[in-house]
Image: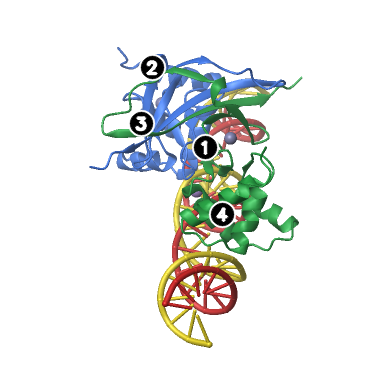
Chain colours: A blue, B green, C red, D yellow
Amino acid sequence: METSRPFARVLEQLRKADLRPTRQRLALAKLLFENGYRHITAEALHEEAAAADVRVSLATVYNTLHQFTEAGLLREIVVDGTRSYFDTNTSDHHHFFHEVSGRLEDIAAEQIVVSELPPAPSGTTVARVDVIIRVTEDTQ
Amino acid sequence: METSRPFARVLEQLRKADLRPTRQRLALAKLLFENGYRHITAEALHEEAAAADVRVSLATVYNTLHQFTEAGLLREIVVDGTRSYFDTNTSDHHHFFHEVSGRLEDIAAEQIVVSELPPAPSGTTVARVDVIIRVTEDTQ
DNA sequence: TGGGAAGTTTAGAATCATTATAAACTTCTT
DNA sequence: AAGAAGTTTATAATGATTCTAAACTTCCCA
Ligand SMILES: [Mn+2]
Ligand SMILES: [Mn+2]
Ligand SMILES: [Zn+2]
Ligand SMILES: [Zn+2]
């Protein structure tokens, strides 16, 4: 159902965004999009690349994540203050944030109904609505 | 309607939290709570203190903001990645985040109706629900 | 098809918000 | 008044992220 589709999409989006399909970008795209949705930090992706014998500098990981975000392939999520997460799921949805582990978990858009929203302050346009449900692991 | 109330509250909360009412804490509390609700960064509060001839180190500003947060006098808000905001309004409410200026604007709880929420993942408890509406200034 | 322009990667340095350290100072208690 | 406990502070350290500028690749077309 989602076999080699992501890759064609990546190539197309790269072309659209005027980004050359370099070895590094393609390898990172593979890691990012090959296996379902993920919420990953730059550092974690860099380590994953190393583990997969993909040689990429951390600077390139940052550059690529930001370029992919700008190209609409990723979405950046800030919940933690200490690090930025990149979400491979760019469709409309929300998140649980596990404050202890630092893990993000998707909440499908349909699962949260925000039935009333104030109008954007005049002179502004809504760029995005983020709902973050912060949860803590129960002790006991 | 809210004249010298905040101060009594601060003193009481400090006592409750076993925090001594030092010159620095009281001066910062004054700056924070004396004039309506605010969303302020550590750096900004430090500068404000300097401008008001209150001598406090930046380390103390950070310590105090965190202690006040723990004591329930403040709430920390992370939206930006580059800095943490502290909100003097600890009641249930939400925010517009002006992405260009970095300004936070309150949205009263009643103005957003989240009529459906998924259950917290098993073994976890909801600590807080944050709704952040990111807006950008219109060009034109 | 060769060569240069433009784009990309990278090691390493720089930035910058925040946190840690540990010594000097205050406050509290008796 | 005096010691214990808590607090402040200058300063150093941390750590994620960004910058720099040189080396490397990819594109494009003469
Ligand atoms: Mn970023
Ligand atoms: Mn903090
Ligand atoms: Zn997600
Ligand atoms: Zn607020």
Q: Position of residue A86 (x, y in %)?
A: 45, 32
User: CB atoms at circles 4 and 2 under 8 Å apart?
Assistant: no
* Residue B133, quarter of picture: top right
Q: Pointer 1: what residue?
A: A63
Please determine if labels 3 and 4 lie on a single subunit: no
The amino acid on which the numbered mark 4 sits, given as a three-letter code, is Leu
Asked if badge 2 and badge 3 are on a common chain, one would say: yes
Which numbered mark, 1 or 4, is in the foreground of this view? 4
The residue furthest top is A1
Amino acid found under the numbered disc labelled 2: Gln
Q: Are marks 1 and 2 in contact (CB under 8 Å)?
A: no
Residue B68 horizontal side relative to residue A97, left or right: right
At mark 4, the secondary structure is: helix
Mark 1 and mark 4, same subunit?
no
Q: Position of residue A41 (x, y in %)?
A: 42, 38
Residue B89: image x %, image y %?
A: 58, 38
Q: Secondary structure at mark 3?
A: helix
Mark 3 or mark 1: name the one nearer the start of the chain. Answer: 3
Q: Residue furthest right?
A: B140
